[in-house]
């Protein structure tokens, strides 16, 4: 839906370019891309799925002031809007193909849109996904919703529900960096490396593809490692024991926070966009960029161990069980 003109109402004189011109200038790159019979410009996109593959559909919304601070650079918002969706595609073991964008803008600032589009297309070309349509509206705050379609071999998508007792629990990358960056900003401080991890998440698409046929279950970690691991455990009807000291931490996080804070950020902070997955140790341990952090148990519940003792982790930190 576009609210730009109702019947007979004159176009606003304060808007320097109209919605069509904005789309033409910044979002319609002319090249429709592979598998696109009809791209931007008609009422809908017409896509050509690869025979024999299934489709994975994901969507994520970024709201100004909720998912990113108002002062975030528009390039980063554009990049991030694509990257957070690609992280879900990665967790399903799929290959990203096509995306649509629903963008709500405050009174149009063309320089903002140009920079947002630059970030969006940077992520799109880096990870091989094509923008095939969208919707552009105006509102009181910026809202960017990206929808991505991916493809995966029939019956092979990675699910949250397949973890088995005896499987190892693995993660990609490092944890707590993005949450650490936000914690520093709230204290009036900044760290370039940590803030890059917030603004430019690295969707683990290559790892996700390698997991197809090897991992028993997988989930994208966006809301905190322990919380998202619990979702996987519930979906699989199992429990897990995690060795807190094995959760990988970046040098940048270690340099900025004490040991307790590092662990709290890594285990409960959000915006990591890493993968957590399960499977046979022998099958998965050799993959690049992954770390084993624990084991799946038949008994329900998530047990965290530190220095041999069971610890209780919540948002306020660590308590050793009495
Ligand atoms: P309609 O009124 O039929 O919904 P629109 O004016 O909203 O058409 O959009 C015209 C064309 O531009 C459509 O092909 C739509 O998919 C595309 N489009 C609109 N906004 C965007 C955007 N932000 N990014 C990419 N394509 C867009
Ligand atoms: Mg529309």
Image: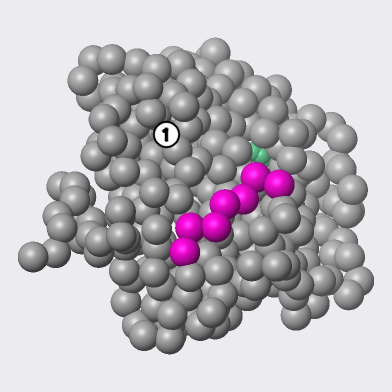
Name the residue carrying label 1. Answer: 177
Q: Secondary structure at mark 1?
A: helix
Is residue 232 rendered to the left or right of residue 215? left
291 drawn magenta? yes
Q: Which residues are magenta?
A: 288-294
Residue 162 visible in rendering: yes
Q: Quadrant of the C terminus?
A: bottom left
Residue most extreme to the front: 308
Is residue 280 rendered to the left or right of residue 178? right
- How is this picture coloured? one colour
Residue at 72% x, 53% y: name it.
Answer: 287
Q: Nearer the viewer, residue 132 or 240?
A: 240
Q: Taking 141 as reference, is 266 above or below it?
A: below
Q: Taking 179 as reference, is 149 above or below it?
A: below
Q: Residue 39 at what x, y percent from top left?
A: 80, 46
Residue at 86% x, 51% y: name it.
Answer: 36
Query: Local crowd at mark 1 within 10 Å, few (<14), some, or many (≥20)?
Result: many
The rendered magenta stretch, by its main secondary structure, is classed as: strand
Q: Residue 150 at what x, y percent from top left?
A: 73, 59
Q: Residue 270 at what x, y percent from top left?
A: 37, 46
Q: Nearer the viewer, residue 127 or 294?
A: 294
Q: Nearer the viewer, residue 131 or 270?
A: 270
Q: Quadrant of residue 22?
A: top right
């Amino acid at each position: 839906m576009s609210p730009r003109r109702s019947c007979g109402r004159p176009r606003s004189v304060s808007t320097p370019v109209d919605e069509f011109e904005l789309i033409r200038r910044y979002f319609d790159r002319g090249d429709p891309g592979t598998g696109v019979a009809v791209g931007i410009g008609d009422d809908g996109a017409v896509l050509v799925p690869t025979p024999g593959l299934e489709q994975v559909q994901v969507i994520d919304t970024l709201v100004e002031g909720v998912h990113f601070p108002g002062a975030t650079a528009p390039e980063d918002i554009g990049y991030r809007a694509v990257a957070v969706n690609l992280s879900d595609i990665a967790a399903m073991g799929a290959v990203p193909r096509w995306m649509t964008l629903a963008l709500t803008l405050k009174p149009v600032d063309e320089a903002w849109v140009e920079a947002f589009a630059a970030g969006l297309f940077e992520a799109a070309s880096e990870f091989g996904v094509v923008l095939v349509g969208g919707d552009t509206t105006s509102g009181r705050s910026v809202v960017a919703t990206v929808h991505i379609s991916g493809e995966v071999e029939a019956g092979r998508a990675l699910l949250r529900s397949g973890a088995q007792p005896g499987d190892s629990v693995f993660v990609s990358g490092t944890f707590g960096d993005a949450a650490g960056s936000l914690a520093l900003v709230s204290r009036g401080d900044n760290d370039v490396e940590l803030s890059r991890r917030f603004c430019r998440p690295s969707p683990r698409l290559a790892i996700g593809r390698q997991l197809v046929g090897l991992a028993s279950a997988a989930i994208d970690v966006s809301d905190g490692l322990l919380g998202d691991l619990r979702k996987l455990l519930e979906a699989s009807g199992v429990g897990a024991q995690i060795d807190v000291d094995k959760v990988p931490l970046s040098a940048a996080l270690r340099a900025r926070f004490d040991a307790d804070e590092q662990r709290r950020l890594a285990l409960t902070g959000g915006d990591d966009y890493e993968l957590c997955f399960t499977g046979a140790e022998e099958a998965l341990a050799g993959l690049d960029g992954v770390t084993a952090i624990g084991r799946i148990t038949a008994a329900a519940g998530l047990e965290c161990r530190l220095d041999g003792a069971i610890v209780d982790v919540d948002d306020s930190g660590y308590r050793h069980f009495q």
